[in-house]
Amino acid sequence: MLRTLSSLKGRLEEHREFIGILALATSFRLFAVLLLNHQGGYIYDGHLFYDYQYYRRIGELWLQGYYPSIDYWMEYPPLFTWTVIGVYRLSLLLPAMRDPIFSFHHFLGTFLALVDAANLALIYAIQLHLGGRITAVRSAWMYALLFWPLYVMVGWLDPLPLLFLLIGVYGLITNRPILAGAALGLGFMTKIIPAVVAPVAQGTAAGAGGGAEHGDLHVVERHHPAELEHLFEDSVTSSTLTEARAKGRDQKRSRPTPSRPSASRRSTPS
């Protein structure tokens, strides 16, 4: 027990700077959800593309017995819409407010603030694996201070598919194919965008050439991106040379063998 606590303390001390960034960024997002609204008005009032109102209507239709993708057409995959319905059900636990969207706005905003905090942690972990601690801390600061993730978080559900995309990338670079595959599958069921990592993973596995095989699944070894590029170039060069040699052998076999002239006696001049 003491050894476990000592190990945990050491790891917390090792990532102390990032923990501070994570705490500041998460509190900033939670207070944005709590304070960037008021009874009767929100920062997005009148915005044509503000989706919280649209998500709430999905929950209201569920309350009336109409299910998305079953009773009416829905452009989003099922995990996306059922996440919205789950948040709407939780919002019904609060008493009614003067503004009908007040409870739903805070439940969904809090949920997405926590999801965005997980996105920040994944960006740090990915950069820690690829570029080292200094690069990871810089990347965490950049994402934490960017305005656009906050802007999207308080109006749309896009931090959730981003979460699955980053988990897929992290599973890929850390040689965890099951984690990457599960994350990309769930991401595709949330929004189509996370599926772009799947062909990248397949191409990286084919280019690396040295991955271990488990059935039909190619596991990518841990390499720096520059090393993967050299491996890919070496693989292409080796493949080209092999094809050229095989082609040369085939041409040599198909080439007709010239017949030798028969030996004849030379006529002796009389």
Image (cartoon, rainbow, N blue to C red):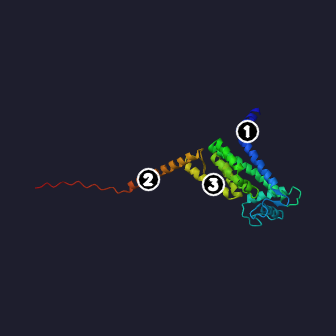
Residue at which label 1 appears: 12
Residue in the foreground of this view, choosing between 156 and 8? 156
Q: Earlier in the sequence, mark 1 or mark 3?
A: 1
Residue beneath disc 2: 244
Q: Residue at x 66, y 48 (%)?
A: 170
Left or right: residue 224 versus residue 236 is right
Amino acid at pointer 1: Leu
| Residue at image mark 3 | 198
Residue 199 sits in quarter: bottom right
Kindly report the distance in space between the C-alpha atoms of the residues bearing marks 1 and 2.
56 Å
Q: Is residue 137 in view from this perspective? A: yes
* Residue type, mark 3 in image: Ala
What element does badge 2 sit on?
helix
Image height check: is 220 above or below 158? above
Q: Which mark is residue 119?
A: none
- CA gap between label 2 and label 3 equals 32 Å
